[in-house]
Image (spheres, coloured by chain):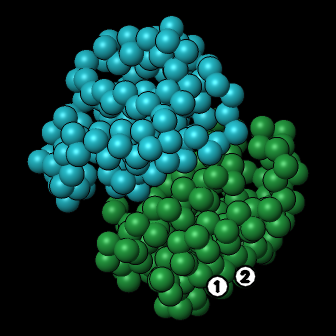
């Protein structure tokens, strides 16, 4: 199974940015954890992060072209603003999971609206940084068609 | 081997899961869901107590009474028809009580509520409540994995 894990703005600051909310693990730690776990069963995880909305849109389009089986997307702040990411996700027919480290619905009201949620199959939030590896562990178990 | 106890409570409407097949979650029944949860917990050495109640006030008082007796909680508030049938304030009070005891609690919804219903997520203390929606019965498995990791880190 091929999986893209796409991360949005400020997630490169993980480990130093408000660690009381986001934890002490860095994005590199999380990426290694996910890739090592996935590789045990022969799955491939490509882990990406960008602070630019358009680059995230292009990665989703790349997932369409490459026929990637699943996308895990943490669009971070773009979650609450980006119709472009919503549209790109709607064009991708593989399995889609929206992921957040914290639970946006418990935070400021401007984080309660997500343009991603209605374009994905599932939403996972508030499980901490471990949410990534738990999601990667689960994806191959799901009854999803290869893309 | 852990002896941690997990309470899994399911709200109104979940006694009959056949409606979910229309949303693409096939072959779901409360029994298969319960078995999936028990199997996942057995593999991790967790003790699961799986309950469902169509009477929301009863379910909530059950939950509040059990907060001290369990180490972690999975809540699917469901609701018979739409968001108006969920007593958000009462769930929030129960979740706050759980969070005040620093115990893991995760809301699990079978369907993606942002796409497939007009329901809203539950509320609670800012750092105290996980949320999983749209993974069918596998959402419970993900919640169990996460809870097990959190309990083993404590």
Q: Is residue B148 above or below residue B63?
A: above
* Residue at image point 48% right, 83% down: B1
Whether marks 2 and 1 lie on the same chain:
yes
Helix, strand or loop at label 2? It is helix
In the rendered image, the quadrant that contains the C terminus of chain B is bottom left
Looking at this view, is B3 or B150 the one in front? Answer: B3
Whether residue A84 is visible to the viewer of this picture, yes or no, is no
- Badge 2: few (under 14), some or many (20 or more) residues near its Cα, within 10 Å? few
**Mark 2 vs 1: CB contact within 8 A:** yes
Colour chain A is painted in: cyan
Mark 2 chain: B
Residue B76: assigned label = none
* Residue at image point 11% right, 48% down: A16
For residue B25, which quarter of the picture? top right
In the rendered structure, the answer to whether residue B135 lies left or right of residue A20 reads right
Residue found at the far left of this picture: A16
Q: Is residue B143 above or below residue A101?
A: below
Label 2 – label 1 distance at C-alpha: 5 Å
* Residue at image point 49% right, 77% down: B72
**How many badges with numbers are in the image?**
2
* Residue at image point 55% right, 15% down: A67
Q: Which residue is mark 2?
A: B58
Q: Which residue is mark 1?
A: B61
């Amino acid at each position: 199974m091929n999986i893209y894990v796409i991360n949005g703005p400020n997630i490169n600051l993980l480990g130093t940015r408000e660690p009381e909310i986001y934890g002490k693990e860095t994005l590199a730690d999380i990426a290694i954890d996910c890739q090592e776990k996935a590789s045990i069963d022969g799955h491939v995880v490509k882990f990406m992060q960008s602070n630019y909305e358009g680059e995230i849109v292009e990665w989703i389009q790349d997932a369409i072209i490459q026929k990637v089986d699943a996308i895990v997307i943490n669009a971070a702040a773009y979650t609450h603003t980006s119709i472009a990411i919503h549209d790109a996700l709607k064009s991708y027919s593989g399995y889609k999971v929206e992921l957040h480290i914290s639970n946006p619905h418990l935070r400021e009201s401007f984080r309660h609206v997500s343009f991603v949620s209605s374009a994905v199959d599932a939403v996972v939030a508030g499980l901490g940084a471990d949410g990534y590896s738990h999601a990667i562990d689960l994806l191959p178990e799901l009854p999803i068609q290869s893309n | 081997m852990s002896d941690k106890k997990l309470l899994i409570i399911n709200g109104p409407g979940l006694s009959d899961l056949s409606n979910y097949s229309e949303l693409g979650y096939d072959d779901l029944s409360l029994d298969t869901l319960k078995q999936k949860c028990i199997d996942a917990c057995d593999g991790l050495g967790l003790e699961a107590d799986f309950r469902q109640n169509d009477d929301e006030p009863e379910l909530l008082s059950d939950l509040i009474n059990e907060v001290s007796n369990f180490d972690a909680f999975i809540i699917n508030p469901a609701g018979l028809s739409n968001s108006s049938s969920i007593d958000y304030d009462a769930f929030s009070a129960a979740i706050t009580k759980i969070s005040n005891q620093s115990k893991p609690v995760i809301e699990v919804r079978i369907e993606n509520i942002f796409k497939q219903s007009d329901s809203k997520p539950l509320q609670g203390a800012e750092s105290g409540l996980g949320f999983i929606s749209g993974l069918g019965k596998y959402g419970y498995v993900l919640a169990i994995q996460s809870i097990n990791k959190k309990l083993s880190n404590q």
